[in-house]
Image: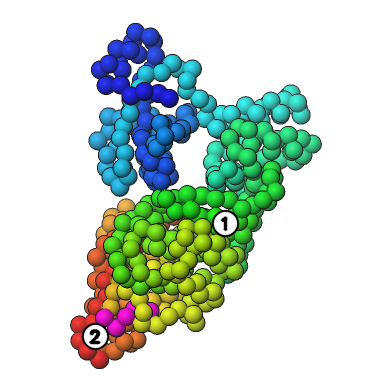
Amino acid sequence: TPQPYRRGAADRVARALRQVIMAAVLVTPAHAKAAKVALERRGWLDEARRIVRHASDRVAIPLVAEAVREAGLATILADVPHEIMEYAALPSAVQRRPHDALLSAAQALGARLDPQLPVTADDVPHKWEVHGDLALLPEGAFAASAWDPIRGELWAACVRALGVQRLAIKARITNDDYRTPRVTMLVGASPIVEHVDNGVVYTYDVTRCMFSAGNIREKLRVSRFNCAGETIVDLYAGIGYFTLQYLVHTGAKYLYACEWNPAAVEALTRNLDRNSIAARCTVLPGDNALTAPARVADRVNLGLIPTSRPGWPVAARCLKPAGGWLHVHENITSDAGADPAAVHAAAGDQIATALAAMLAEEHGGTWAAVVRHVEPVKSYAPHVTHVVYDIECRPVSAP
């Protein structure tokens, strides 16, 4: 395991031994995913090296050299307990990127098929998803019919190159009410995977349920809420993306989880048991407009994109007469050249106005709905941002 050095000492060692200075962020396993995603977004993750265990209670995430001197490094990792480690190592210690290993394997197999047909970097996927020990290749990966004679060998080579045990490939999501994934297993029989985010265990069937790794930042933010003694309604619970964070980390007293996808309900029920929190949660299968409990919630989570608008009147009905908080997820589009922050703020004000009217209609009297925080989660498409609005809703006059 690389040992940390003081910067000056490391420089001297590197010069003396013709080694190179490397750097890594040390985090707990529970925070590894959040740190990795943040570094990837800024281009500061060194993909030429692997993420490895450091000592018994830390994970070392490799940094590109210039990231260590960047003032913004501490900012993007502000929500993640961490420390920076620098060390000297031989250049041979740098491992190949998984893409390079995948390319080498494909080139070797391709040469057997047709020595006159070279395999280039553009012929192999640059991105894929990893769910536990299963890699999920993107739609169209290795689709050329030329690979047909040796597909079994090709998939085995992919497994070795990507450092996983199982392999699958996805196609376009089914256009149904559940947005069911279309995934085909290539290596391995079981599609059940286990994933850990922020100390919470998620298990799910990759052929039946979606999992958005890009929401890790919002899950971490939710986990820091103080919900002590509160009753929460999660209107779009899925497999428990936010439900589990509320129950494990925030001190919530009880939660009602609404979900209409039977496959997601099955996974959610299993995840509640897996995290030992089933006693504090009621799962309500079916359309939340019909199943969501009325006037019980201190807080309602509306985690559906591209829009949660159909759930707004349901959320108004769920809130207690004394009011509470709504966490509204929306995709917000900004015109080219516009200030995204201003666009997001204006959209939030419009949402709050609409919610105040719905609350007045549901509970009577006059209500105030105020946006207390605007959280851009991730880019969804060019000029489209997934945004969460924390909106405090209170009655200002009696019915």
Q: Nearer the viewer, residue 279 or 27?
A: 279
Label 1 element class? strand
Distance from disc 2 to disc 1, alpha carbons, whole Å, reads 43 Å
From the viewer's perspective, tell me whether residue 99 is left or right of residue 147: left
Q: Residue shown at 25%/17% (left/top)?
A: 8
The N terminus: image quadrant: top left
Question: Above or below — where is 320 with respect to 217?
Answer: below
* Image quadrant where residue 277 sits: bottom left
Image spot of residue 129 (x, y percent): 54, 45
Amino acid type shown at disc 2:
Thr
Q: Residue shown at 54%/41% (left/top)?
A: 127
Q: Nearer the viewer, residue 262 or 151?
A: 262
* Image quadrant where residue 227 sits: bottom left
- Give, as a single range, the part of the protein colored magenta: 318-322
Q: Earlier in the sequence, mark 2 or mark 1?
A: 1
Disc number for residue 204: 1
* Image quadrant where residue 215 sits: bottom left
Residue identified by numbered label 2: 366
Q: Is residue 319 visible?
A: yes
Total number of numbered discs in the rendering: 2
The C terminus: image quadrant: bottom left
Residue placed furthest toward the top: 16
Colour convention: rainbow
Amino acid type shown at disc 1:
Tyr
**Residue 76 among those drawn in magenta:** no
Mark 2 Cα-neighbour bin, 10 Å: few <14, some 14–19, many ≥20: some
Image spot of residue 286 (x, y percent): 54, 76
Label 2 element class? strand
Image spot of residue 186 (x, y percent): 69, 45
Mark 1 Cα-neighbour bin, 10 Å: few <14, some 14–19, many ≥20: many
